[in-house]
Image (spheres, grey):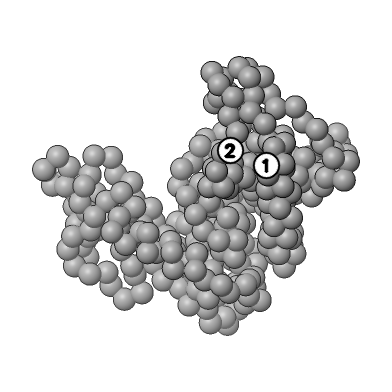
Amino acid sequence: MAQLIKLQDYISRYETNMYQYPSKYIRLKQENWTKIKQLWEQGELQGREKKKEIPLEEDRKDKPWLRFLRKRQVEHHVEAIEEEAWTPTTMLELKQYFLDGLLPFQIKWATTTLQKKSFVDGSIHEDENLKLFLQRLPDTFLVMYHPIVEIKTVPVEAEVILIGPHEIEIISVLDVPDVTTIYPSSESSWHVEKRGIRTKMFSPMHGLKRTETFVKSVLRSYDLDFPFRKVVLAPSHSFDGPKASYLTSYIDKASYTGWLEEKRKLSSPLKHNQLKVADLLIRHTKTLAVKRPEWELDDSKNQL
């Protein structure tokens, strides 16, 4: 599960220590996957009767992170499953169960620190594109999801910035309802085919180039040489037309699986230069946050 290090203009725990939290997250995830897997194999992840929650039998030795995860897993399914009991029956279902429980925890880390918090739009939890990046990519990929950056003193919303061990991908996700084929061009407008009729759409290259300007500016300011490329990601569509320009990729439904598999097969651990680049990029984003109330500060002492 990729790590959400920056979400829009919300405060992030990764801002406080980029060199600590990525490896800490990987360690905690591995520890608690082992714990959840053992509970499942021992039959302790039981289903529920109608409108009845799974009883929480917490081990006193459980880390607060695991207790939070188990609590969120219960909450996640309470409203969704009312007619019949449910528990993961296969390893694949168990992995998805675990990932779904991690998602709110990741958002928590990306919107709070131990001292401050941001006010989060509820729609964030239902953002399918965010879920796609976090749940389909490995732990060693760091995600900046539409961060608010400053370009020529003007704050703007950037595209998705995916920081891997060896390169940065600046990604624009296209999901155009009822469209089958997208026709890229070098113009300010692209064309799409919708029910057999071609219409214009705004070129995603504008946002990609704007975000590229931000990334290049930060790298240049610190004399860093770290590869990057631009990606137009359209998992539900097909591209037809000229090939992408230099250092740009068009990923459609035919190449999407290969794009994901390439990242999943990457065995490289987190790299020092990767963390350095992520730290510098996040330092040049905007953050809006307030001090957490005293009762939340007391509670945070018992949480990671």
- Labels 1 and 2 touching (C-beta < 8 A): yes
Report the side of 260 relative to 238 (left or right): right
Res. 290 mark: none
Q: Earlier in the sequence, mark 1 or mark 2?
A: 1
Residue, x 55% and y 21% (percent of image)? 84
Position above or below: 219 against 35:
below
- Dot 1, crowdedness within 10 Å: few (<14), some or many (≥20)? some
Please give the label number shown on residue 88.
2
Residue 60, image x and y in percent?
88, 41
Q: What amino acid type should be assigned to the residue bearing mark 2?
A: Pro
- The kind of secondary structure element at disc 1 is helix
Tell me if residue 248 can be seen: yes
* Residue toward you, 99 or 127: 99
Cα distance in 3D space between marks 1 and 2? 8 Å
Q: Could you tell me which residue is drawn at 46 percent across and 73 percent down?
A: 228
Q: According to the image, label 1 marks what residue?
A: 40
Can the viewer see residue 153?
no
Q: Secondary structure at mark 2?
A: loop
Q: Dot 2, how many residues are within 10 Å of its Cα: few (below 14), some (14-19), or many (20+)? A: some
